[in-house]
Image: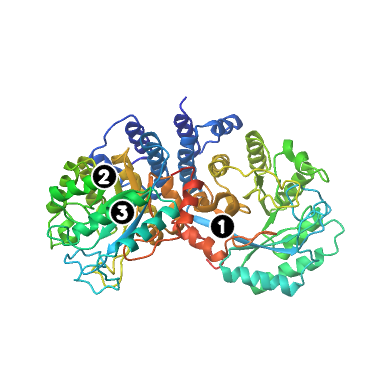
Amino acid sequence: MKSYDLIFSLGKKVLEGGQVTFDEALSLTQIEESDIPILLGVANKIREKFTGNAVDTCQIVNARSGNCSENCKFCTQSAHHEVKLNVYPLMSEDEILAAAKSAEKDGAYRFCIVTAGCGMDGDADFEKITSAIKRIGQETSLNRCCSLGTLNEEHVIALKEAGITRYHHNLETSESFFEEICTTHTFSERVETIKKIKNAGLQACSGGIIGMGETWRQRIELAFTLKDLDVDSVPINVLNAVKGTALEDTKKLNPMEILQTFAIFRLILPTKILRYAGGREHNLGELVPLGFLSGINGMLLGNYLTTTGRGATEDLKTVTNMGMKPLCPRS
Amino acid sequence: METRQIITLGEEVLAGYKITRPEALRLSCIEDADIPLLSAYANKIRLKYAGNHVDMCGIINARSGRCSEDCKFCAQSVFHAADSPTYPLLSKNELLKQAKNIEKQGAKRVSLVTSGKGMQGDSDFESILAIFKEIISSTTLKVCANLGTLDLGQAQRLAATGIRRYAHNLETSKSYYPTICTSHPYDERLETILAAKQAGLELCCGGIVGMGESWDDRIELALALRELGVQSIPINILNPLKGTALENIKPPRPLEILKIFAIFRFILPDRVIRPAGGRELNLRDMQGALMLGGANGLIIGNYLTFSGRNSDIDFQMVHDAGLNQ
């Protein structure tokens, strides 16, 4: 079969409400390079049909930075790495609120509080964080999310009561590649946290990082695991190999391969939010806007945890320039 | 038009089929969500018939303003009170300096442009020939001329001097032309193009989109260029400059511009299609999409009466899109 026949037959199947199988998705990784833009075009069509023109934007705050016990190889915040990093304990409630207000002013639809560390078990900061979440609810109209690592059931209930609508917890990569990336905790621990979130009726935001040396098959595995978990939003980071991390020498992915990854994720996850995240500027350069014509319908606005983005205004301009509409908290 | 029909037509063009006017018109009616797919086919057609090279050229405004013609888009027309530079033909040294600067930026081609209707009875013509000789012998650039109307004798002298290519836009379709310019007819532009062709010069002819023309007009222009066998097609996207007759025109949306370039590629599979003035203003950060949407040429640096962007960004964009010069 010619690769365009394959792309169109799978695209048609998804557009008609069908699902691609693992092997079908894998076959899309083998198409000729000159057919990649066609795959992107089909992914764009699927995005438009199932999610419309709305773009879900979020801004994150690194509310507690560095000194993390975990050894995730990509991460600048791991205590196992020697990275020049601004390390600080939990910000004060006022500081977190100020970050939220700034996100609101920037036009973000969501605001996410992120803390370094394995998780919330026995973490004295948890109470302070829920208090900050409540206050953000009182003083802004932002949709509130957080990313605090592993959680137990009590945490989930407390966060829901505080007004969290969506919890972020990346799978990072596929189960089969996870041990290459992190050995201080297991993939199934991550899955368990996501299941607790979904069981409590909260939305889940979970994705990963591509370009860490994983195979195409492993990327597809990740997408299918996210599909099985029925996560609502899938952030896709592209590795920004920061000096001092274990992955500092990893070679950049080719821009077309990155766009192809987005498109294949869109075919596997037609109705979900595919969210542009860290590393996009670093890896895609002048082609960043093309993500929005390849299946992307969400984005982190402005800066990431330990790296900087282009700024919220530039990001929002890109969205409107593509003929899409950023969601607005008051709408 | 259905998605399936875009694919069928795309495959047909890839197999060597020349698309017709009604087919091109049907392509212009696709919905926005299908535009990236159309661009993808344009990209494939470009790759198959024109390869992976991007033809980059820099232009020099060698003589500016005080033009007798009334082209509505133009800041150099005496009929407009636009804020544009006015100066007589620049010196040989100055023009050589500018050409060398373009060479240094990395372009392989330069075009010298003079304001005015054309070269008939123009006392600058001999000086211009001497300047061309100098640029040709002192740089490695391919040199093009854009001097307005020419007669055959003048075209032959340019060819004898070593000029590769003559640039003379049709501006728009024959049908829409009288709305844009009344001081000289469309057929006179055609005559110049034919004279240049007869003299053995390559042709660089395109136009401006976003001047209020219809899709019919755009396709008519593309088909006229196909008929003439021009090698390079610069497509400007109107920059409605203050003081010109078109100052209040609303520019086309970025997606619409992508559609225009893709359809031009469908009509002109193996030609150089060159995004020109107005791309920064009208496409903004979507210019990269054009490099994967059928374009394979660029005017870099500044335009005649307004600025472009730093050419480093354009070289980076071409590289990121997997193309090369």
Most foreground residue, A14 or B155: B155
Q: CA distance from mark 1 to mark 2?
A: 35 Å
Which chain's residue wears label 1? A
Instruction: Estimate the spatial distance between the alpha carbons at disc 1 and disc 3, rounded to whole Å.
Output: 57 Å
For badge 2, the amino acid type reads Leu
Q: Chain of mark 3?
A: B
* Count of picture labels: 3
* Residue sticking out furthest to the top: A1
Number of the front mark, 1 or 3: 3
Kindly state the secondary structure of the residue where label 3 is placed. helix
Q: Quadrant of residue B92?
A: bottom left
Position of A56 with respect to B248 (left or right) is: right
The colouring scheme, among rainbow, by chain, secondary structure or one colour, is: rainbow
- Is the residue at mark 1 from the same chain as the one at mark 3? no
The amino acid type found where label 1 is placed reads: Asp
Q: Are marks 1 and 3 in contact (CB under 8 Å)?
A: no
Residues at discs 3 and 2 in contact (Cβ within 8 Å): no
Residue at image mark 1:
A56
Mark 3 — residue? Answer: B134
| Residue B282 located left or right of residue A273 | left
Front disc: 3 or 2: 3
> Residue A216's spot in the image, x, y percent?
62, 35
Residue B116 visible within the image? yes
Q: Please report contact status of discs 1 and 2: CB closer than 8 Å, yes or no.
A: no
Is B167 or A141 nearer to us in this picture? B167
Q: Amino acid at mark 3?
A: Glu
Return the mark for residue B25.
Answer: 2
> Is residue B251 visible to us here?
no
Q: Is the residue marked by circle 2 packed among few (<14), some (14-19), or many (20+) residues within 10 Å?
A: some
